[in-house]
Image (cartoon, rainbow, N blue to C red):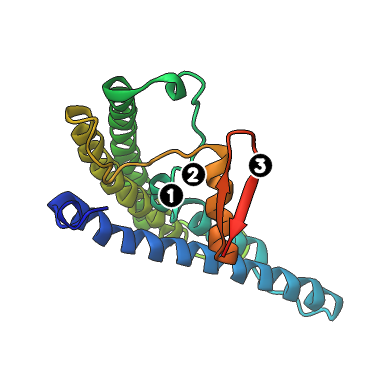
Amino acid sequence: MSEQIRNTALARFDHAFSKIEDLSNWVASGVIFLLMLMAVYQVIARRLDFPIFGYIDMIEQMMVVFAFVAVAYCQREGGHVRMELFVSKLRGRTYWAVELIGVIIAFMVITILILNSFDHFLRAWELGDTTINAELPVWPSKLIIPVAFSLLWVRLLIHIAGYYRMFINPNSTPVAVTVITNVEEEAAREIREALGVEVEFSKEGSNDATR
């Protein structure tokens, strides 16, 4: 990406917001690791007759974190399930138009979900709703959902701007959009991240790895 493109307002905002998304992904990953430790301890503690009181209730609460907190990060990375049988055949302005329409629809759906999930949080807060066994308050987990969806809302808004930019000028360098890679490119990226090795795939499917 050239210095001129990197200094545009959209690129700067996309880069700044990606830091928040990266943090949310680390939080979700940390919760998964904590759940793993809790599960190991619970197995051992049950043998010693010292199980964690309210273990199931805690798991139910913590599942919300890794299920929703990193949803904006996943959207940025193109990690959500996509139906590309038709879209992958498109090129140029038509492709960017279809992507733009899809993101706008997702943006409207998420807006509705934010409002409804926030209503559920308010109801749990006002009623003092708790879990059945340990009687843990459920409003923190219900608050996480509209907050996570709000991050996704902002990411979709960034995508709308990015896809609209590409629709207006399909020959420009993609900024603030999800660039979907093929199988070979994705494999090369994962190898490069894991081993620091550059991989080049030929059309026949062979590859040369060089340091």
Task: Answer with mark 2 or mark 3, whichever residue precedes in sequence.
Answer: 2
Q: Residues within 10 Å of mark 2 (few under 14, many from 20)?
A: few
- Report if residue 131 is visible in the image: no
Q: Quadrant of residue 109?
A: top left
Residue 7: percent from left, percent from top: 15, 57
| Front residue (pair 24, 148) | 24
| Front residue (pair 57, 190) | 190
Residue position for label 1 = 71
Horizontally, residue 127 falls left or right of residue 59, namely left
State the SS at label 3. loop
Whether 191 is drawn above or below 91: the answer is below
Residue type of the residue flagged with mark 2:
Gly
Residue position for label 3 = 206
- Camera-near label (1 vs 2) is 2
Residue type of the residue flagged with mark 3:
Ser
Residue 127: percent from left, percent from top: 39, 54
Task: Answer with mark 1 or mark 3, whichever residue precedes in sequence.
Answer: 1
Question: Which residue does the image show at 49% across and 26% down from the upper left?
Answer: 84
- Camera-near label (2 vs 3) is 3
| Front residue (pair 138, 107) | 107
- Report if residue 152 is visible in the image: yes
Residue position for label 2 = 79
Horizontally, residue 1 falls left or right of residue 204, namely left
Evaluate if marks 2 and 3 touch, with contact meaning CB atoms under 8 Å apart: no
